[in-house]
Amino acid sequence: MRLDPQQVDLSDPTLPSIQCSIEHISLDNAPKYTGLSYTWGSSVRILSILVNGRDFMVTENLGAWLKHTQKALTDYKISMSFWADAICINQDDDDEKGWQVQQMPDIYKTAQYVTVWLGPAAEDSEYG
């Protein structure tokens, strides 16, 4: 999955501010990517993003990571390839989920980096 710097007009609140593209790859020929390990929190999908131009709902915590990361990408004008289970695995297909979960050790082992996201900093912390 690829996350690019923000290119959406934020003055239109009806448009999703996060846009990603996704493609199928083999771990044998994988480009450099970051594996994301994060807390799911609530399983309720509340944030709309665009994946390959189509609406896709994500959880609050994954949405927080996407927003946080996209801001950094926009500041530095770079893109990033990453793997996040909730987006890269079809959550409505139990067979695919079962197969992909078995692949997760290799997915993380093959990643150039692995990022751990516990959630946004608390407002009263030195990082908030």
Image: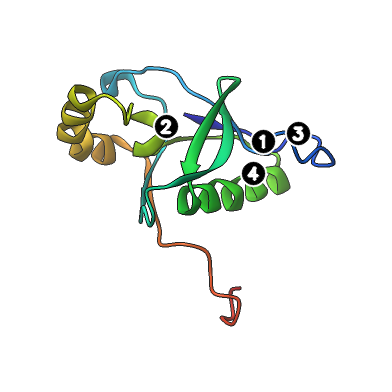
Pointer 1 or 4: first along the chain: 1
Image location of residue 14, percent across then percent down:
74, 36
Is disc 3 in contact with disc 1, using a CB cutoff of under 8 Å?
Answer: yes
Pointer 2 or 1: first along the chain: 1
Q: What is the spatial separation of the Cα atoms under label 4 and label 2, in whole angstroms? A: 16 Å
- What element does badge 1 sit on? loop
Dot 1: within a 10 Å radius of its alpha carbon, few (fewer than 14), some, or many (20 or more) residues? some
Image location of residue 66, percent across then percent down:
55, 46
Amino acid carrying label 3: it is: Val
The residue that disc 4 covers is 73
Q: What is the spatial separation of the Cα atoms under label 3 and label 1, in whole angstroms? A: 8 Å
The residue that disc 1 covers is 16
Residue found 59% across the figure and 53% down from its top: 68
Amino acid carrying label 2: it is: Lys
Q: Which mark is residue 32?
A: 2
Which dot, 2 or 1, sits closer to the camera? 1
Image location of residue 122, percent across then percent down:
54, 74
Q: What is the spatial separation of the Cα atoms under label 2 and label 1, in whole angstroms? A: 26 Å
The residue that disc 3 covers is 8
Give the quadrant of the C terminus. bottom right
